[in-house]
Amino acid sequence: MKRLLNGEIILSLIVLALAGLAPNLFPAAQAGVAKLSLLGRAVLIPSIVLLAGTLLLARSLGYERLVNRTLAGAGAGILATLALEVVRATSFHMGGMPGDMPRLLGVLLTDRFMSGPSPVSDILGWSYHFWNGAVFGIIFAVTLGPRLLRWFEIYGFLIGMGFLISPAVSALGIGFLGLDMPAMPLTVILAHVAYSAVLGHLTNRWVRQKGWLLG
């Protein structure tokens, strides 16, 4: 039993490491580490493939808790991103955001920043946007499992603040935390609160076993 538990923990840590890569690629690109198009090919795609492979290995070894938490977290995160989008898109169309983030992600992923979006760049940008929502769901579900909703609200707030203090916002030219455009930080926080509310509700329904990763 101890050996099985240790194996599950090792694979869980691998899942968390792979899931944590995607949300950091856009800030890394904005910080000048490398183009998002390069990071997409060199890091994003391999991380998704390796995550899928790790999940298949976990299933073959009988680590059903890890499989359940990963799939439940991903599904909850994707649906929670729809709630985030209601807030973000509404604010964007009312002039509360400096740009359309999924479309921006798409043109950066396809190196079309100067020529503008295309159907392919839009698909890739939206896919990356929703994948980020999925991996944030995976990270919470795998690490913590079902929790009181306030845990999810704290998590969503921290995600929003992490985005606001990242190079992704400072590169937009709207000041520290986006305070030169007051609707921007408000939108980000409210969007992530909406995300966390849906994430919490669905995670608590879909994750079968309670307890911490190391529990």
Image (cartoon, helix red, strand yellow):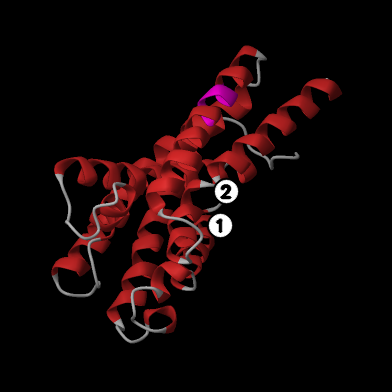
Task: Give the spatial CA distance, label 1 vs label 2.
Answer: 6 Å
Q: Is residue 201 visible?
A: no
Residue 184: % across, % down = 31, 75
Residue under pointer 1: 151
Residue visible at 28% across and 79% down in the picture: 183
Location of the N terminus (image quadrant): top right
Viewer-closest of 170 and 79: 170
Give the dominant element type of the magenta stretch: helix, strand or loop.
helix
Residue 10: % across, % down = 73, 32
SS of the residue at dot 1?
A: helix
Residue 34: % across, % down = 47, 56
Q: Is residue 172 visible?
A: yes
How many labels sit on residues? 2
The label number, if any, that marks residue 147 in the structure image: 2
Location of the C terminus (image quadrant): top right
* Residue type at the position of mark 1: Trp
Residue 169: % across, % down = 40, 72
SS of the residue at dot 2?
A: loop
Residue visible at 41% across and 67% down in the picture: 168
Residue 144 in magenta?
Answer: no
Span highlighted in magenta in the image: 51-55
